[in-house]
Image (cartoon, grey):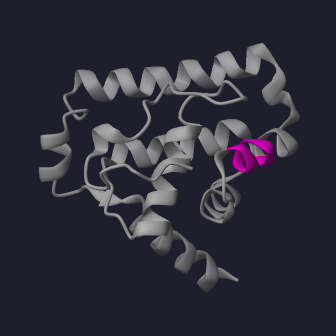
Amino acid sequence: MNTEVDPINVENLPSFDDVGETGIYFLKRMFVSAQLNKGQGANIVKSNREWSLIVLVSDLLGVGLEATISKLYSCESFSEFEKWVTHCVPTTKSATVKQSINRAVESHFKEALSSNEGSVKKIASNAHAVTMATLARLWLSRCLQCH
């Protein structure tokens, strides 16, 4: 994977509609962000809306947030992550399922852009902005306390 991305610049992450073999929006952006957070200790700042989109995509796929976060950080390549998605959710091969997920992701991003949360300056200055890695750590620590 190419990690020659400026880790501070959110605009250098893949677009929400950049897809791989599955044709599902946002998977590549989630994966690259997790890899940068994991591999370089990068501080990719995201809005709460982007985190909620991670939750939404996990739910729409039916794999759950815990499994998604685990695989985002454990897979070594985007191809490996996509293979996991298609193995766990064989219905992702269905055009109808892809369209449904992609419409939800696109709607989410359009809403964020129209409310001006897509602006890097606004995201960076937003007091509620957090990193995906921080949220993942918090969420995983809660899960460990529950078990």
Point 82% across, 24% down: residue: 93
Is 141 a magenta residue? no
Q: Toward the viewer: 130 or 9?
A: 9
Residue 27 rendering spot, x and y as whole percentages: 59, 39
Residue 57 rendering spot, x and y as whole percentages: 60, 39
Residue 125 horizontal side relative to residue 59, left or right: left
Residue 32's place in the image compared with 57, above or below, is below
Point 64% across, 45% down: residue: 58
Residue 113 rendering spot, x and y as whole percentages: 27, 25
Residue 21 rendering spot, x and y as whole percentages: 72, 29
Would you say the magenta stretch is mainly helix, strand or loop?
A: helix
Bounds of the magenta segment: 79-84
Q: Toward the viewer: 132 or 2?
A: 2
Q: How many labels sit on residues? A: 0
Residue 24's place in the image compared with 100, above or below, is below
Q: Quadrant of the C terminus?
A: bottom right
Is 80 a magenta residue? yes
Please tell me in which quadrant of the rendered image residue 119 appears: top left
Point 45% across, 20% down: residue: 107
